[in-house]
Image (cartoon, rainbow, N blue to C red):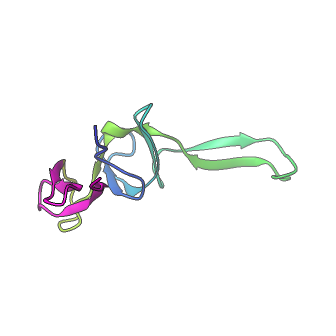
């Protein structure tokens, strides 16, 4: 099954506390079906002083959210869109935005 979202995609959160926020995908974990989106689902981690971080304190970081709670942003309309897959004549598979029909990038190249 091809991934409808990939690292580097711009997405909008469609459910949860951060609904409506947009950001870039930093990591994708296909096994757990989770993604980390820049600036979304931020939490505080209380860190004790270490040699790396001599001051310690509260550090804010992004935590994973379920991949079903994000939708890719259409490059033409800047609106959230669903994704379909199309195989071109040279055999490469592409992700296509449903709303505008524009390509979101190549998923797999021809063998």
The residue positioned 16% from the left and 64% from the top of the image is 102
Q: Residue furthest top?
A: 32
What's the magenta region?
A: 84-111
Q: Is residue 41 left or right of residue 4?
A: right
The residue positioned 26% from the left and 58% from the top of the image is 73
For the residue pair 38 and 16, the one nearer the viewer reads as: 38
Give the quarter of the image for residue 10: bottom left
Q: Position of residue 27 (x, y in %)?
A: 48, 48
94 in the magenta segment: yes
Q: Is residue 43 left or right of residue 38?
A: right
The residue positioned 70% from the left and 47% from the top of the image is 58
For the residue pair 73 and 43, the one nearer the viewer reads as: 73
Q: Position of residue 65 (x, y in %)?
A: 43, 39
Give the quarter of the image for residue 99: bottom left
The residue positioned 76% from the left and 47% from the top of the image is 57
24 in the magenta segment: no
Q: Residue furthest front?
A: 111
Q: Tag count in the figure?
A: 0
Q: Position of residue 66 (x, y in %)?
A: 39, 36
For the residue pair 78 and 18, the one nearer the viewer reads as: 78
Q: Quadrant of the N terminus?
A: top left
| Residue 111, above or below 30 | below
Q: Is residue 52 left or right of residue 69?
A: right
Q: Position of residue 44 (x, y in %)?
A: 62, 43
């Amino acid at each position: 099954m091809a991934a409808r979202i990939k690292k580097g995609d711009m997405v909008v959160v469609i459910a949860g506390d951060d609904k409506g926020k947009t950001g870039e995908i930093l990591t994708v974990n296909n096994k757990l079906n989770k993604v980390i989106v820049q600036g979304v689902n931020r939490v505080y981690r209380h860190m004790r002083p270490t040699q790396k971080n001599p001051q310690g304190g509260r550090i804010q970081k992004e935590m994973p959210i379920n991949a079903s709670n994000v939708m890719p942003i259409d490059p033409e309309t800047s609106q959230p869109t669903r994704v379909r897959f199309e195989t071109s004549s040279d055999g490469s598979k592409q992700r296509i935005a449903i709303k505008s029909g524009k390509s979101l990038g190549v998923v797999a190249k021809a063998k």
